[in-house]
Image (cartoon, grey):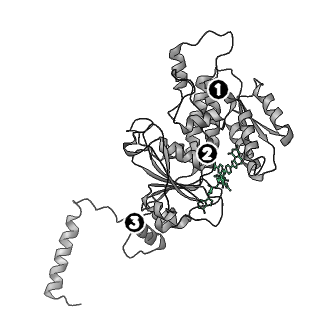
Amino acid sequence: MRLTRTSANLLVRLSSKQLSTKTIPKPPPPLFKPHQTTKSHIDIMEAQQVPKTCKVILSDTIAKKLLSEVRETLAKIQGPDASKPTLAAFLATDDPSALQYAEWSKKTCEENGFNFDLRKVNKEDLEESIIAANNDDNVDGILVYYPIWVGNHSQDKYIKETVALSKDVEGLCHTHLFNMYHNVRFLDPPANLKKSILPCTPLAIVKTLEYLQIYNPILAYGNRLFGKTITVINRSEVNGRPLAALLANDGATVYSVDVTGVQVFTRGEGIRQLRHQVHDKEGWELKDVLPLSDVVIGGVPTEKFKVPTELLRDGAVCINFSSFKNFDGPAVKEKASIYVPSIGKVTIAVLLRNLVRLIANRPRPEGSAPEDPKDAKARSEAFIEG
Ligand SMILES: NC(=O)C1=CN([C@@H]2O[C@H](COP(=O)(O)OP(=O)(O)OC[C@H]3O[C@@H](n4cnc5c(N)ncnc54)[C@H](O)[C@@H]3O)[C@@H](O)[C@H]2O)C=CC1
Ligand SMILES: Nc1nc(=O)c2c([nH]1)NC[C@@H]1CN(c3ccc(C(=O)N[C@@H](CCC(=O)O)C(=O)O)cc3)C=[N+]21
């Protein structure tokens, strides 16, 4: 082959370059060659272009953190050779969801050093059985599964009042509920050493919001939701209404939505009031409050109900506590910043946290020396705030 002048020059230039590579370090090899377009490379490139920004947080993660705090606190308030605390749980119906919840609770109790004593009783014997447990020093906490007399709220209410205040692990006695609605945090003012007990599911949602850092620790304790707007879809006496009150007492503006309409729970402008107030929002509907909300909490007990994703604020935080999925999973992940699909495990962790709190609240055994006030304060503060 005859070389032209240009190609001959090129050869000379190439060979002098090759010579010089002996002294210059080799560049690192490319990560992947541009002509290699395997599926995984396309996936990586697409993921880089459209990152999945929504973080899905599972209740297990939140529950694990709480349970380790519970074990630590129990060790602090009990001596090294203290016996396992016992939770007595009364089931007086054949409600399958209560039975399943009881089985999950039993497992978590036993894995974390607690006894769970499920007592199946007849409705007619329930009151006497509770009184016996109230008087039994081997029972540390009492839980009764509701509803019992379906459609007869006052009979269930009577049973709630039968449980001793000192053993009311779900915070359903009047004193506990009164303190919650009135934003009173202690049972023994002005000493303030015994914390009032809060209902488990609403408190589990508070603990979830703390974990997600929606509670702002820069603000004073009790005001940490100031500036946040939260929608709660459910206003039942056991879940939605106490939850709306708790969140508003902590400073949030809360829209409480149920089948009858919308109410707003708030401590007013500048959160200057000491406890929340409730006002009807005449003519308002879910569609009016969703676009305003930083956090949306679903608790509707039906399969067909879904929060309309298109009305959510971009980057909203979405939490479901219903046993049915209130959010359309794939769609909500495109819109929300954080999605918590269920909170059942957190509820059970909070149940154990409440049990440890009941033990911490107990008066010292008769005959023992009075506790040094400093120790009492430290014991009460063995709990993280809330
Ligand atoms: N994960 C947990 O820790 C727990 C979960 N649950 C679950 O939470 C759900 C709710 O339980 P409860 O409060 O006892 O039920 P409930 O039947 O007493 O109350 C339901 C509430 O939702 C409202 N609601 C129903 N349909 C609605 C709609 N289309 N739009 C707006 N509001 C609507 C009702 O007005 C009512 O306020 C159930 O699925 C239950 O299994 C209950 C206890 C604990
Ligand atoms: N005094 C009393 N307190 C209760 O808390 C109480 C009661 N009575 N009676 C029965 C209902 C029922 N209940 C549930 C709790 C957790 C889930 C739960 O864990 N759900 C799972 C999802 C369930 C699933 O996977 O299907 C979750 O949120 O992760 C469900 C239902 C409490 N109840």
Circles 1 and 2: CB atoms closer than 8 Å:
no
Circles 3 and 2: CB atoms closer than 8 Å:
no
Q: Is mark 2 within 8 Å of ligand 1?
A: yes
- Residue for badge 2: 201
Category of crowding for the residue at label 3, using alpha-carbon neighbours closer than 10 angstroms: few (below 14), some (14–19), many (at least 20): few
In-image side of 344 versus 149 (left or right): left
- Location of the N terminus by quadrant is bottom left
Q: Residue at x 81, y 35 (%)?
A: 127
Spot occupied by residue 122 in the image (x, y as percentages of width and height): 86, 42
Q: Secondary structure at mark 3?
A: helix
Q: Secondary structure at mark 1?
A: helix
Q: Secondary structure at mark 2?
A: helix
Q: Residue at x 77, y 52 (%)?
A: 96
Pick the front one: 42 or 239? 239
Q: Residue at x 68, y 20 (%)?
A: 81
Q: How many marks?
A: 3
- Residue for badge 3: 48
Q: Quadrant of residue 66?
A: top right
Spot occupied by residue 5 in the image (x, y as percentages of width and height): 13, 86
Q: Is mark 3 within 8 Å of ligand 2?
A: no
Identified by mark 1, the residue type is: Ile
Q: Residue at x 17, y 75 (%)?
A: 13
- Residue for badge 1: 359
Q: CA distance from mark 1 to mark 2?
A: 20 Å
Category of crowding for the residue at label 1, using alpha-carbon neighbours closer than 10 angstroms: few (below 14), some (14–19), many (at least 20): some
Spot occupied by residue 89 in the image (x, y as percentages of width and height): 75, 38
Identified by mark 2, the residue type is: Thr
Q: Earlier in the sequence, mark 1 or mark 2?
A: 2
**Res. 324 in view:** yes
- In this rendering, is residue 51 above or below 270? below
Q: Quadrant of ligand 1?
A: bottom right
